[in-house]
Image (cartoon, rainbow, N blue to C red):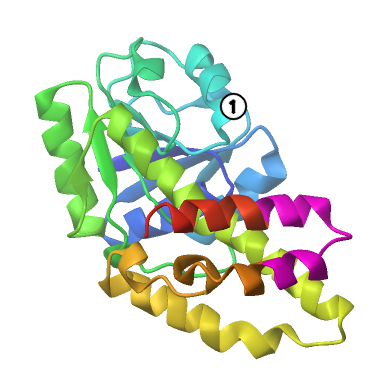
Amino acid sequence: MNIVILGSGNAATHFARQFQKIGQHIVQIYSKTKANADALAFDLHCAAIDQLSELDLNADLYLIAVADQAIIPIVETLPENLKGIVIHCSGATDLAVLSRFKNAGVIYPPQSLSKDKAVDFSTVPLCVEGNTDENSAMLLQLARKLSPQSIYCTSHQRLAIHLASVMVNNFSNILYQMAYELLNENNLSFDLIKPIIRETAEKAQNHIPITVQTGPAIRQDSTTMQKHLQFISNKPDLQQIYQLLSQEITKRK
C-alpha cells in the first residue's frame, strides 16, 4: 500500500514508522513547514513536500495526522477525486469532516505519543471507523496488522474513548504535577510517592477502579480530610479540587 502522511508531528511520526515496519510504502510526507517534512522524510527515505499542489494523487491511503484544528483546513484543500482512502487519526473529530471524499475513515490510537519515545503499537487498541462497510473492513484489517487488539467503533464511541483517555492521562498528570509542587514546597522529593503511583496504576489494570479505592474519602474519614484542607488553606483552587474529587469518591461508596 502506498501511503501519504499529511503532518510531521508526534502522531504522524509514529504512524509513518509503524506503517513502514509492517511493510507499507510511505511515498510522501507533507508539512507546511518544509524543514519538518524533510526531517521525517529523511528518516523514512521518502519524498517531502510543503505544497499540497505537489501531492501524489495515486496513493492508496492519505493519513491526516495534524492537530485537530488543522484537520478541516487540510480537508478543504485536498482534491475530492483522490484515488485512495482519506483518513484522520483524531479521537475528538467526527468522521463526517471527511464527507467530501468517496472513501474515508479514521484510525485513532488512544495513547500518548511523543516523537522521542518509542511506542509498542501492538499493545494499543486502535479505534477504526469507515464511511462504508468495505472501508471499515479494510481499515480494520490494516489496523490489526499494527495491533491485534484494534476494534471498530462509531465517532460517538471514539469521542467517549478520547474523553476517558484525557481523564486518565492528562488529568492524572496534572494531579502528579500538583503533588510534585506540594512536596517541593515542603523540601520533599517526588520520588517518595512514585511507589504509590505505580501501585495505583497496576491495580487499575486488573480491577474496576472503585473496587480498589483507598484513602480518607472512601473511609469517610472527615477528621483526616479536614486536616488536609487546613494544610492547603492557602491554595483555594487545590482545596476545591480536593473537595470535588472526595465527593466523587464518597458517592460511589
Q: Is residue 232 above or below residue 46?
A: below
Q: Is residue 245 above or below residue 97?
A: below
Q: Position of residue 20 (x, y in %)?
A: 35, 57
Q: Is residue 125 above or below residue 28?
A: below
- Is residue 121 left or right of 139 when viewed as pictured? right
Q: Position of residue 18 (x, y in %)?
A: 36, 58
For label 1, count other residues whose C-alpha is less than 10 Å away and answer few (under 14), some (14-19) or many (20+): few
Q: Quadrant of residue 238?
A: bottom right
Task: Read off the magenta span.
Answer: 226-241
Query: Which of these two is toward me, 139 or 252?
Result: 252
Query: Which of these two is toward me, 244 or 4?
Result: 244
Q: Give the quadrant of the N terminus.
A: top left
Q: Position of residue 97 (x, y in %)?
A: 41, 17
Q: Give the quadrant of the C terminus.
A: bottom left
For residue 231: magenta?
yes
Q: Position of residue 162 (x, y in %)?
A: 42, 42
Residue 197 in sight in this render: yes
Q: What amino acid does circle 1 point to?
A: Ala
Query: Which of these two is toward me, 61 or 203?
Result: 203
For residue 25: magenta?
no
**Total marks in image:** 1
Which residue is rendered at x = 45% and y = 41% of the image?
A: 163
Q: In the rendered image, which residue does mark 1 sit on?
A: 70
Q: Circle 1 — which element?
A: helix
